Amino acid sequence: MDTLKIMKELTQVIGIAGDERHISQLMRTYMEPLCDEIVYDHLGSFFAVKKSKKANAQKVMVCGHMDEVGFMINDITKNGLLKFILIGAIDSQVLLSSRVRVVTQEGKEYVGVIGCSLDDVTTCDVKKMYIDLGATSKNEIEEMGICVGDSAVMDGDFTILNNNRILSKAWDNRFGCVMAIEVLEALKDVELDYDLYIGATVQEEVGMRGATTATGLIRPDMGIVMDCPSANDYKGKDDEIGQLGKGVLIRYYDKGMMPNRALLNYLVKTCQDNQIPHQYFYNMGQTDSAWIHKLFAGCPTLSMCICARGGHTGNSMIDIHDYKSAKKAIINILTSIDHSQIQAFKEENR
């Protein structure tokens, strides 16, 4: 597979929380030929299933999330400007003068810019901002097919920079979507001791809703969540938490999940034994693992992440070396675990 091609395709599709269908449709074109079946929950979370030859095999759920932060149109002014609300956590300071793409329910896209009155620039209040598509009237906007409830995102082209770093919108979390495709492709001829469910959830950015319903659908025995939290390495200090180019994250704490120690240690040993670059990480954010690990009787779950600069903007940046490190770690874990190992993770705290 052409990794950069898939990365560009998936990052550039518009898919805010609640309107992710174009992402799953694209993922399906890649994943359906590689799996035994495709399953969905009723919110739109999407999983390719690779069946084990064992009867009553355990289930391992591996997922990123499809949705990106963005905007929903909630009013159209008489002079042709669009009012909007935020979908997901976006700092208002990154909005003014940002280019945006608005997409209609029919899939037609329009480019615009976020602006406000000069009197309101210093307050940086989202309620006083507008999306400007260059229209001159409400009627013109309606003729374009745009209506209240349509989606918009901050625009950001897919651009390869020096030193194998890539700038784009939506790395949080199209990283996990790309990884799901490539991991499934890497395992297509590998016999596993468990049933693998690998794909992506919806509505993570508004409360991890798809993780809840997808876990109910699959009822996994073990979970791996692939996400893309913010780097914190602008000061250039060696001890900064989350550095580009330093490898896959050993995420030992976040506010949503206390990790299964045996599973976390298994990741560390996997990285050490296979010379995979890795770095220890914590933050006060959370991922889909916050729900997956605690539903029903509980599920040992691992956060398998890389970090990005400029998250939740139109210009986030990853390092391709981190992507390769995470991919190698995930594949090594999925090909080395079996029924007894998964059971040991489940019994870790007894």
Image (cartoon, rainbow, N blue to C red):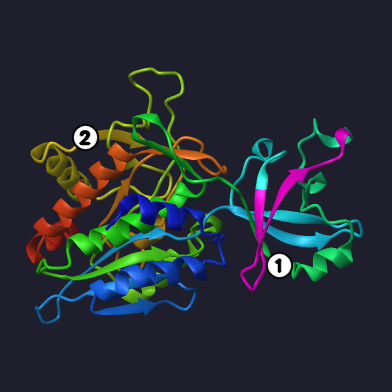
Taking the spot 24% from the left edge, 59% from the top edge, the residue there is 183
Coordinates of residue 191 in the picture (x, y in percent): 9, 69
Q: Which residues are magenta?
A: 100-118
Q: Is residue 84 left or right of residue 25?
A: right
Q: Would you identify the image quadrant in which residue 322 lies?
A: top left
Element class at badge 2: loop
Taking the spot 40% from the left edge, 18% from the top edge, the residue there is 236
Q: Is residue 86 left or right of residue 228?
A: right
Q: Which mark is residue 291?
A: none
Rendered position, 297 above or below 182: below
Report the amino acid beneath label 1: Gly
**Residue 41 is covered by the magenta coloring:** no
43 or 213: nearer the eye?
43
Coordinates of residue 297 in the picture (x, y in percent): 29, 68
The quadrant of the picture occupied by the N terminus is bottom left
Residue 215 visible to the viewer? no
Coordinates of residue 288 in the picture (x, y in percent): 41, 57
